[in-house]
Each structure stands twice: as structure tokens, then as C-alpha cells.
Amino acid sequence: MNKLKKCLLAMMLLMTLTACAKFNGTLNVNSDGTFTISGELLIQKDMLDDQDLKSENLLNDIDKDLASHLSAEVIERNIDGIDYTGIAFKSDEAFSDDIVQIDQNDDKLTLIINQNLLSRIGIELDTLDDSDEGIALLESLGLDLKLQIKMPGTIISANYGDSFMQTVTLDLVDNIDSAFIVVSYVDNHVFYIFLAIAALIFAAILTLFYILYQASKRKKKTA
């Protein structure tokens, strides 16, 4: 029965926009708890045509409170020979919103994101099949949801995604029902201090080797 339900769900997804959506977004977090957001939401063009929908309608799916901070335009892209249409959006200035939760504790900043981010942009995932088979099927149909998060300081930990320095990239499809938690320093002063100390230690070691080398050369000459 479960397999039958999954197959039926898969068939239904073929007729929805979500199954062929691509989202590529960037969230820039500031040390004061505000952020900017930008990205592209694309839908396979022939699917829109089959449903007799226009890409302009995607603008109406963005949550009104969130949309008040964004400017958006209709775009078209060709990806791997497939035509997509959709919207590109960005926030004109930094703002705060419960779309994400940002908490500061001493010199650390914690960012928490749940699926309300995508739903407010217009992507509903709460009804999707989150089994391994269901996710693999969605990805094969073209569902690709990526979010890059840029923190104000070096990232200490992230429960999902690939992180390097101040940036972590999340695959939202692989973790449909997950909350994303990223912890970073509020800024990079601690990191820069560490680099400065490391540089001084390295310079001192090089100087010591140079002094020993010169002393060894002088000793050979006098021998």
C-alpha cells in the first residue's frame, strides 16, 4: 500500500509545478540580526504552458510581508537544453523578519531556518514525499533547491550542508523536513587575531631557522 501511495503521489507531482522547480538563493546575514536575501525561482516553461499559467503569477505566490522588502522581475533561463521561466528577486536593503530566527550570545550568532522560508517564497514542500525514493524521484524530475548562507563571521558549526569560512551551502531537497541551524562568530575579529598570532609564530620560526643557518655557515667558514 505504501508503494502504491508513493506511485500515486509521484504521478500527481508530474502535474504540479513543484516537481520541476529550481530555486537558487543567497541569504546574507549581518551581525546586527538583519539580513538580505536574493535568488531565482524557475519553473520548466512547458509545464507552465500546460497548466496555462504565466510566470508573472509566481510573483503573487510570495508572501505579502516578505514581498514588501523585495524587488522582483520575470526572467527566462535555458538549463541543460530545457527552457525555464520564473522570477529573480532581491531585497533592496537589509531587514529583519521571522522568516529566519537569529540569536546572538556573546561573540556567537545562531541562525535557524525552517521550511517557512520556502513556503513564503511560494514553494510548498510540506505535502511532498520525504522518503529516499520520493526525494530521488523529485530530483530526477528537476527539483533543485539550493540556498547559500553567508554569515558575518567564520562558521563554527552547521547541522547540514557544506561550509567553508563564512559560507554554507544547503540542499533543501535532501532535508525537506529539517530545520537548518548555523552557528558562527558575530564577526571575524577572533579569527583574525588567531591568524595574526599564527603568522607571528611562523615568522619567529623562520627567523630562528635563518639565524641557525647563518650561524652554521659562519662555523663552517672558521673550521
Image (cartoon, rainbow, N blue to C red):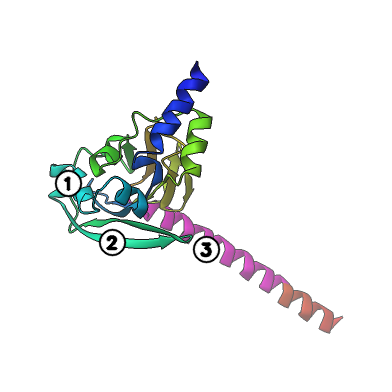
Residue 190's x, y, as percent? 40, 51
Q: Distance between the residues labelled 3 and 2?
A: 51 Å
- Per the image, the residue denoted by label 2 is 75
Residue shown at 25%/44% (left/top)? 121
* Residue 182 visible somewhere in the drawing: yes
- Per the image, the residue denoted by label 1 is 60
Circle 3: residue type? Leu
Q: Is residue 213 left or right of residue 44?
A: right
In magenta segment, residue 219 = no
Q: Quick one: label 3, few (<14), some, or many (20+) residues within 10 Å?
A: few
Residue 113's x, y, as percent? 32, 37
Residue shown at 67%/73% (left/top)? 210
Residue 213, image quadrant: bottom right
Q: What element carries label 3?
A: helix
- Per the image, the residue denoted by label 3 is 200
Please name whichever residue, 50 or 24, is drawn nearer the observer in this view of the structure.
50
- 3 or 1: tag closer to the N-terminus: 1
Magenta segment range?
A: 186-212
Q: Please tell me whether mark 3 or mark 1 is closer to you in this view.
A: 1
Q: Quadrant of the C terminus?
A: bottom right
Residue 79's x, y, as percent? 44, 60
Circle 1: residue type? Asn
